[in-house]
Amino acid sequence: MLKENLKNEISVLESMIQAFRGLESSVVSKDIEMVSKYAVNIEELSLELMKIESERDEILKNYQVDTVKEYTEKCETPETPEIIVLSTEIVEKLNELAIVMDGIKQIIEFDNQYVELLNNLVRGVQSPTYDFSKNKPPYSNNYTQVQNQPRYDGLK
């Protein structure tokens, strides 16, 4: 029973990894429709994962333990070694999922910084070379306007 639950969790995690990889490629290609599709898919998989975890909690309660680790330490069954292997595989899948999610985060951060740089170049705003925030009040603006009008207005 616990073994099937862990296998289901691995399956959902694999699907989630694939969905996040698809999300990553659609973020890179800036395909908003696909981003929405993958976001919905990820949300559905998250709900399914929560359901599987709550089922596992019920299974563990029946064995009078709180965690899979406690189960493997206290219950000596023929499937205990396989449960340990499945638990290790779940940890590996979670690590892989974290790596993919971090990649998406880095892509989005880079894109935001790039857009900010372009906006600063077009508007004629310079970011400071030094951080004077220690000497200025917290409400002061860190950016200075080079001209009263944006640069592209001066080209007319």
Image (spheres, grey):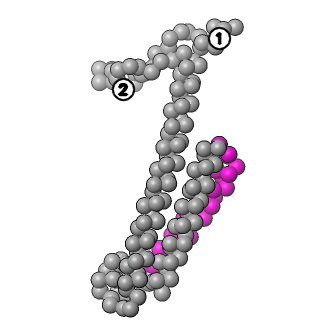
Residue 130 versus residue 21: which sits nearer the camera?
Answer: 21
Residue 123 position, x and y percent, is 57, 18
120 left or right, relative to 140: right
Residue 121 versus residue 136: which sits nearer the camera?
Answer: 121
Residue 112 position, x and y percent, is 53, 35
- Please say if 45 is above or below 144: below
Identified at 34% across, 23% down, the residue is 131
Residue pointed to by mark 2: 138
- Please say if 148 is above or below 49: above
First of labels 2, 1 by sequence position: 2
Is residue 118 on the magenta stretch?
no
- Please say if 99 is above or below 145: below
Residue 64 position, x and y percent, is 35, 86
Identified at 58% across, 50% down, the residue is 24
Residue 54 position, x and y percent, is 47, 75
**Amino acid residing under circle 1:** Asp
Query: For mark 2, does the 10 Å Cα neighbourhood hold few (<14), some (14 to 19), or many (20 or more) residues?
Result: few
Residue numbers of the magenta segment: 30-57
Identified at 61% across, 49% down, the residue is 25
**Amino acid residing under circle 2:** Pro
Q: Quadrant of the C terminus?
A: top right
58 left or right, relative to 11: left
Q: Nearer the viewer, mark 2 or mark 1?
A: 1
Q: Quadrant of residue 20?
A: bottom right
Residue pointed to by mark 1: 153
